Image (tube, helix red, strand yellow):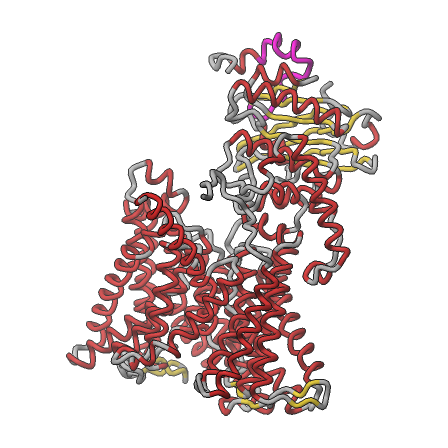
């Protein structure tokens, strides 16, 4: 499993059923290695979990995949929505969604002054084509386009059980609802891979169980893979097909939930923390 | 009995804003008639036209400040450039008004885009500094290139001649200003409600979310700034053809700050708020403050008035005075209800 | 040769004026997290205060300058207490706009109190000396030395004193600094006070050549901001060094190219530099957390 760190040409070695392949990913902040030679891959239609103790570098891995951070070393090979294989490293953060990769954030990043449906509509920003002239004069093209995607957004909101609050402002909604709105936003651009940063954080037990169902449904309905970071071990073991455990930016183990739970290194890393 | 809403509703269905803007325009058109009848002073048309022209400029800056969270301190420079170009093209080169209008808006926009290209790559506050520098350079140009600008003597132009033969007088130029204002209000309304407007709001609320959703922050910031410069230049052209005179010392930082005061005082991200703000900032000093005994005579009163208002509003009423009426109404309603 | 010496000395003098103003701006930026656009206007206002004292008492210029600095210090404290400290929760853009509102207040207040006519402020010392045909006024020497001494003292205090440590801690993370028991509101207030005093000294150094008037600091304000841009907003020394570079460039351009357009050319040059060095000559890129 351990790959030769010199082997950077991952494009050729990527399997047909692999959607994302991370190789030798490394990034340091002021000498501190946040991610250290990390490699793993995600298969098509897989729900893949990334776990690790606090400060293990999980979110940093996400930020390196989505190019919010520029990794010092390594490659992020992605099979995009045109079924082409390419390295994401070096792309701009705003280019990533066009490849079919979309994410949520640890501290929900929604726009308070916009309505729920408008927030979700931002999710398909890249689909809009009307020119600026067409928009300011409300020409038929701009109107039709807006109506089309608004309908789509309402569809997604219905699916997520948010339709009845679509015209409400995001400000003042409960945390669980915010998490769902953010999830709804990722579904607007028909992604191939959705990255969820701590989707269950701050949810109560019932909400967490509902979320597990929802993520499974999303995977089937939208035919995509899901990569998620989570603290809640039970959530991850219930939901994920495979799990990658990291500690201090380094890989500990990859495997099925059962394998990970049985792994001594993982247990050691979590020791004293309980299973939250 | 209306029930209290638990959740705030984003879109208040309060008539069609575009219809309201047109109605507002029609009301404004009554002013020349009132002057003819003798109810309103002749000079008040100039004050009103200025307020409306400044409102156009402020709408542009409101897009920039309100929707992209950027500040430009170059409003005066770009508006001033609009006035000089309009005067040069129509009075010196004898170009038709329409063509002059297009070029006089395009040139400042090009300069603006170049300024934006450089400064917007870095932190937001670089734009303010860069535009301040560009504005100072432009003012230097107004003073020093005297073979075109007449230096400190200032430059004159005439009321516009439409389509090459239809010469407007003062009242009709006022009508033209009103038409432009209503058009700009409609355009601004459509703009902020388009996907581009949504992208700008997103960018302002969360840069990270915007980037993750494929919004190119640099491009949209540049767009918002270009629109702000365009509106400023358009305001400059209209100013030139209504006031018929431009002079370097009009276009100082203090003027840019007044435009900023308009949007803060009136209401950030609000079209009616911008109009209200323009009346407060440019109308109150001329129509009210100067008429007051003693303090009306003191130089600098208007500045202090606007400066204090800016700070007080940011600290205590950040949505702007445009919401004052509905807030007071709501307060009274709840009081009434409690009293019952 | 004598021309070069002349330019060098002029550069040190103008550079020092920009550097004092820039140091004020960067102190406030680092502790209050806002660009203070009112730095120049507050300095102008206090230059009027100093000149007003001078005209009405006939005290020597250097003593009046100290009074001016004290009045600036008080104004800085008042501005912080009345306005800035109330704006802790306000977003950065609105905070910048608050400082723009301050410009309007001081711009309106100055003529109200001191009248609209420009006032004259004398040099600190008169007389000049010739070195190899370059004329050096004693006043310029005083300005250069006073500027450098003040900055050296401030930098020494920033590095070595308890106050300096508190300022640096507040600058790097004000929340953590507060948790560590550093009185960050006091540090911020001090920055506004010191910045105003620094700006006022630079205004009074400039005053003999420009007269004391409403727009006297406009150019200095912009060049001080551009010094921060050129030097980078991340360090205290960057803007100060950049200010001297700008002072030098300004004098060179005035002499060799055009004195009318020197400022304009300088602005464009600085913008061109940040095209290639976006974070300034001494700045470093900051990774934003998401």
In the picture, which quadrant includes the N terminus of chain A?
top right
Q: Which residues are magenta?
A: A248-266
In this view, the residue in front, A194 or C219, is A194
Against A236, is C204 above or below?
below
Q: Is residue C19 visible?
A: yes
Tally the numbered discs.
0
Say which residue appears at 37% left-offset and 38% top-offset.
C176
Is C205 inside the magenta-drawn segment?
A: no
In this view, the residue in front, A140 or A71, is A140
The part of the image, by quadrant, that contains residue A264 is top right
- Residue B138 x, y percent position in the rendering: 55, 77
The part of the image, by quadrant, that contains residue A73 is top right
Say which residue appears at 72% left-offset and 48% top-offset.
A147
- Residue A70 x, y percent position in the rendering: 64, 40
- Residue C92 x, y percent position in the rendering: 45, 52
Against A94, is B109 above or below?
below
Say which residue appears at 67% left-offset and 17% top-offset.
A254
Q: Is residue C145 visible?
A: no
Query: From the viewer's perspective, is C121 left or right of A212?
Result: left
Query: From the viewer's perspective, is C182 left or right of A112?
Result: left
In this view, the residue in front, B114 or B35, is B35
Against C116, is C201 above or below?
above
- Residue B207 x, y percent position in the rendering: 57, 46
Is A249 inside the magenta-drawn segment?
A: yes
In this view, the residue in front, A250 or C213, is C213
């Amino acid at each position: 499993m351990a790959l030769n760190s010199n082997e950077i040409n991952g494009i050729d070695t990527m399997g047909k059923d692999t959607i994302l392949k991370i190789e030798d990913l490394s990034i340091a902040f002021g000498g501190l290695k946040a991610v250290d030679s990390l490699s793993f891959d995600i298969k098509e239609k897989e729900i893949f979990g990334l776990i690790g103790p606090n400060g293990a570098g999980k979110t940093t891995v996400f930020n390196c995949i989505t190019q919010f951070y520029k990794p010092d070393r390594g490659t992020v090979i992605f099979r995009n929505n045109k079924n082409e294989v390419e390295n994401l490293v070096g792309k701009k953060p705003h280019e990533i969604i066009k490849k079919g990769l979309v994410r949520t954030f640890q501290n929900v990043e929604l726009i308070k002054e916009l309505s729920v449906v408008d927030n979700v509509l931002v999710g398909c920003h890249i689909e809009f084509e009307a020119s600026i002239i067409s928009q300011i004069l409300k020409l038929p093209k701009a109107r039709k386009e807006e109506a089309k995607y608004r309908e789509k957004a309402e569809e997604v909101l219905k699916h997520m059980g948010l339709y009845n609050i679509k015209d409400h402002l995001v400000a003042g909604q409960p945390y669980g609802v915010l998490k769902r709105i953010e999830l709804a936003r990722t579904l607007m651009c028909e992604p191939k891979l959705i990255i969820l940063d701590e989707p269950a954080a701050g949810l109560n037990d019932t909400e967490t169980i509902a979320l597990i169902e929802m993520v499974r449904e999303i995977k089937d309905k939208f035919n995509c893979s899901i990569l998620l970071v989570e603290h809640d071990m039970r959530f991850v073991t219930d939901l994920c097909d495979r799990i990658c455990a990291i500690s201090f930016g380094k890989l500990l183990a990859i495997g099925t939930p059962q394998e990970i739970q049985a792994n001594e290194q993982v247990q050691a890393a979590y020791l004293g923390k309980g299973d939250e | 009995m209306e029930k209290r809403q638990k959740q705030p509703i984003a879109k208040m269905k309060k008539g069609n804003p575009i219809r309201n803007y047109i109605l507002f325009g029609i009301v404004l058109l009554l002013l020349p008639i009132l002057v003819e009848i003798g109810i309103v002073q002749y000079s008040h048309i100039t004050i009103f036209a200025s307020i409306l022209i400044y409102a156009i400029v402020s709408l542009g800056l409101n897009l920039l400040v309100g929707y992209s969270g950027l500040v430009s301190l170059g409003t005066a420079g770009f508006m001033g450039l609009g006035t000089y170009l309009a005067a040069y093209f129509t009075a010196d080169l004898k170009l038709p008004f329409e063509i002059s209008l297009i070029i006089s808006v395009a040139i400042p926009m090009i300069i603006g885009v170049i300024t934006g290209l450089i400064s917007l790559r870095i932190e937001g506050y670089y734009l303010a500094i860069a535009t301040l520098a560009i504005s100072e350079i432009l003012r230097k140009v107004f003073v020093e290139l005297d073979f075109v600008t007449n230096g400190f003597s200032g430059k004159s132009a005439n009321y516009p001649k439409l389509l090459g033969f239809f010469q407007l007088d003062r009242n009709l130029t006022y009508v033209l200003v009103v038409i432009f204002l209503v058009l700009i209000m409609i355009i601004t309304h459509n703009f902020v409600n388009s996907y581009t407007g949504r992208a700008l709001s997103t960018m302002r609320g969360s840069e990270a979310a915007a980037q993750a959703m494929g919004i190119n922050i640099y491009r949209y910031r540049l767009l918002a700034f270009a629109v702000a410069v365009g509106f400023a230049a358009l305001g400059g052209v209209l100013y030139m053809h209504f006031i018929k005179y431009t002079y370097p010392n009009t276009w100082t930082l203090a003027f840019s700050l007044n435009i900023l005061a308009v949007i803060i005082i009136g209401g950030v991200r609000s079209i009616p708020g911008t109009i209200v703000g323009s009346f407060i900032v440019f109308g109150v000093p001329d129509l009210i403050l100067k008429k007051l005994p003693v303090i009306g005579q003191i130089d600098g009163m208007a500045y202090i008035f606007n400066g204090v208002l800016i700070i007080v509003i940011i600290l205590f009423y950040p949505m702007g005075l445009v919401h004052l009426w509905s807030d007071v109404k709501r307060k009274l309603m709840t009081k009434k209800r409690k009293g019952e | 040769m004598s021309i070069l010496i002349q330019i060098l000395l002029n550069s040190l003098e103008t550079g020092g004026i920009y550097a004092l103003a820039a140091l004020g701006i960067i102190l406030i930026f680092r502790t209050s997290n806002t660009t203070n656009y009112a730095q120049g206007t507050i300095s102008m206002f206090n230059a009027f205060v100093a000149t007003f004292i001078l005209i009405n008492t006939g005290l020597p210029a250097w003593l009046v300058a100290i009074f001016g600095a004290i009045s600036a210090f008080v104004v800085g404290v008042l501005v912080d207490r009345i306005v800035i400290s109330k704006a802790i929760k306000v977003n950065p853009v609105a905070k910048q706009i608050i400082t723009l509102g301050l410009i309007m207040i001081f711009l309106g207040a100055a003529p109200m109190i001191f009248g609209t006519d420009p006032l004259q402020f004398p040099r600190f010392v008169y007389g000049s000396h010739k070195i190899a045909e370059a004329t050096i006024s004693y006043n310029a020497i005083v300005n250069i030395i006073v500027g450098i001494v003040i900055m050296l003292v401030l930098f020494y205090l920033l590095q070595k004193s308890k106050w300096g440590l508190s300022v640096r801690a507040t600058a790097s993370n004000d929340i953590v600094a507060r948790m560590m028991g550093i009185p960050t509101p006091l540090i911020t207030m001090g920055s506004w006070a010191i910045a105003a005093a620094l700006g006022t000294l630079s205004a009074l150094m400039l005053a003999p050549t420009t007269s004391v008037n409403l727009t006297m600091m406009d150019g200095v304000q912009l060049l001080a901001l551009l010094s921060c841009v050129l030097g980078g907003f991340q360090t205290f020394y960057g803007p100060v060094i950049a200010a001297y570079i700008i002072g030098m460039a300004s004098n060179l351009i005035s002499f060799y190219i055009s004195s009318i357009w020197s400022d304009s050319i300088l602005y464009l040059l600085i913008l061109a530099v940040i095209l290639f060095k976006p974070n300034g000559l001494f700045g470093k890129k900051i990774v934003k957390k998401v």
